[in-house]
Amino acid sequence: MDTSSQISMTTDELFENYVAPTYGRFRVAPVRGQGCWLWDEAGKKYLDFGGGIAVCSLGHAPAALSGAIAAQASSLIHCSNLYQAPNLGKLARLLVDDVIGLPGKVFFCNSGGEANETLYKLARRYGTVQTKANGEPRTEILTFSNSFHGRTMAGIAATAQEKVKAGFGPLVEGFRHLPYNDVEALRTAVSEDTVAILLEAVQGEGGIHVASPEFLKTVAEVCREHDLLFLLDEIQCGMGRTGHLRGWETALGEDPVSAGVVPDAVSWAKGIGGGFPFGAVWFHRRGISNPKNAPELCDLMGPGSHGTTYGGSPLASAAVTAVVQEILQKDLAGHAAAMGDYLRTKLAQAELPFVRQVRGLGLMVGIVVDTDAVVALTNSQETGTPASIALVDALNRAKLLTVPAGTDVIRLLPPLNVTEAEIDTAVFMLKTTFEKLAATA
Ligand SMILES: Cc1ncc(COP(=O)(O)O)c(C=O)c1O
C-alpha cells in the first residue's frame, strides 16, 4: 500500500499541516549532530549553544551514549517496573552515592514535568502524615516568582509565570508564589497549611536567576523550623551544568551539609539523560516523627502510591548510566565551571551591543539585552516579536543556535564538554550578528 510519505512536502509544509502548533518553532531543520555542531537538511552547519535546551550535556551523538543505547537495545529494551532490572538498581546507587552524596532512594520517570509531579505527590503525602495541629492534612507548596516547573496541570500551578497558566483553569490548588530571593517575604509566609517549599537554585526558563546563598540558607532554615519539605528542582541546573553536580551547591558557594542546606528531595531531567528522555527524583533517607512507626522519607511513597510504565527501563538506565559516568569520570562539572568562566570573560571582552548584563553560573548563562534598542532595529514592533526571539532568530540565520528566555534574555547552554575554540567561535558569531544589527540604526 502506498503511504502518504510518498507525496513530497517540504519540512515547512509538514509542520504547517501536521504538527500541532504548541511551539513557535524557528525555521531550522536539523538532521544530524556531532559534539557542539548540528547540520540541517540542506547541509548547513550550526554551532549549537542551545544544547537542546540544557539537555545535550555530552553534545550530539556522543559515543558513550549512542554506544550504550545500541548495546542495550540489542539485549533488552523494556521489561516493566514489575521486575528488578539490575541496571536500574545500579543507576540508583550511582545517583545516591556519587551525585547527591547523601543517603536516600531514587524514583525513575521520563521527563521533568513528571519528576516534579512526584515532588508534589511526596509533599501531599507528607502533609497527611505530618498534619496540622487539628489532624487535617497540610497541602500548600510555596514556589517562587519566575519559576518554571513544567507543563502538567500541577506543573503550571506550581510555576509562577502567568503565561503558562492562561486558559487552563481551574488550576490545581495548593500552590502559592513568593518573590524569589526575598528572605523577609519567606520568613513570614509559612501558614498552618504549608507543607513544602520548591525552588530552582538557578532558574532557567525564568531568565537565569541565581538564588543567593542567604536565600538558600533561609529556605532550609524555614523548612526545619516549620517541618516543611525542602524540594529542589534541579532539572535544568543540575548534573554539572552550573559547574557542580549539585546546582544548589554552586549557588550556595560552600559545602551544603556544613551550611545546613540539605534538601529532602531533588528532581532531575534534561541533562541527566543527555538527550535520552528521562526524569528521576531522589528522596532523602531521614526519619519522620509522626506517627512513631512512620517509614523514613525515602520510603514514604510505598507500593502502589506512584509509578510510570517506562520509568527507568533497562534502555533508559543504560543510557543515563553512560551519561552520568561520563560526567563523573571526565569531571565535566569542573570543566563546565572553567568553560563558564572563560565564556563570561570572552563575552565581557567582546563588548557586545545591546547587552545589559551577563548572569548565571557555569554553562547556564543568560545574556540580558536592551529590549527597546533591539525592537527598534528589528521589525518586531509590527509583529510583536520579543527582543529575545528576534535576536535568537538573527543568530540562527548566522548559524549560532541559542535559546530565548522571557522577552529580554538569550540563554547559552552548550554541552558540558564544550571547548575554548567553540566558545571563541560562538562569541565571534554573537559579536558579528549584534554589531551588524546595531549598524542598521
Ligand atoms: C526547571 C525545570 N523544571 C521542569 C521542567 C519541565 O521539564 P520537561 O519539559 O522535561 O517536562 C523544565 C523544562 O524546561 C525546567 O527547566
Image: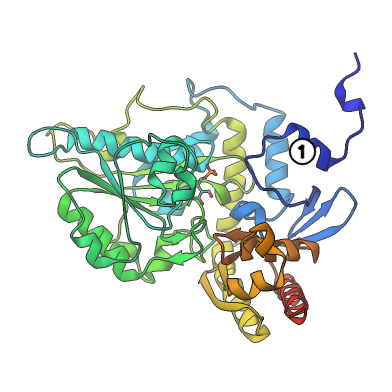
Above or below, 249 relative to 276? below
76 vs 355, nearest the viewer: 355
Res 168 seen here? yes
Above or below, 384 relative to 292? below
260 vs 26, nearest the viewer: 26
Q: Which amino acid does label 1 sit on?
A: Glu
219 vs 431, nearest the viewer: 431
Q: Where is residue 253 shown, x and y percent of the image?
A: 39, 71
Q: Does the residue labelled 1 lie within 8 Å of ligand 1?
A: no
Q: Where is residue 336 shown, x and y percent of the image?
A: 58, 67
Q: Is residue 80 left or right of residue 349?
A: left
Picture quadrant of residue 375: bottom right
Q: Where is residue 107 shown, x and y percent of the image?
A: 43, 36
Q: Where is residue 439 shown, x and y percent of the image?
A: 77, 81
Q: Is residue 194 left or right of residue 144?
A: left
x 38%, y 52%: residue: 232
Picture quadrant of residue 339: bottom right
Figure disc tally: 1
Query: Quick one: label 1, few (<14), some, or many (20+) residues within 10 Å?
Result: few
x 87%, y 40%: residue: 10
Q: Report the residue that reaches farthest toward the front.
A: 382
- Disc 1 target residue: 16
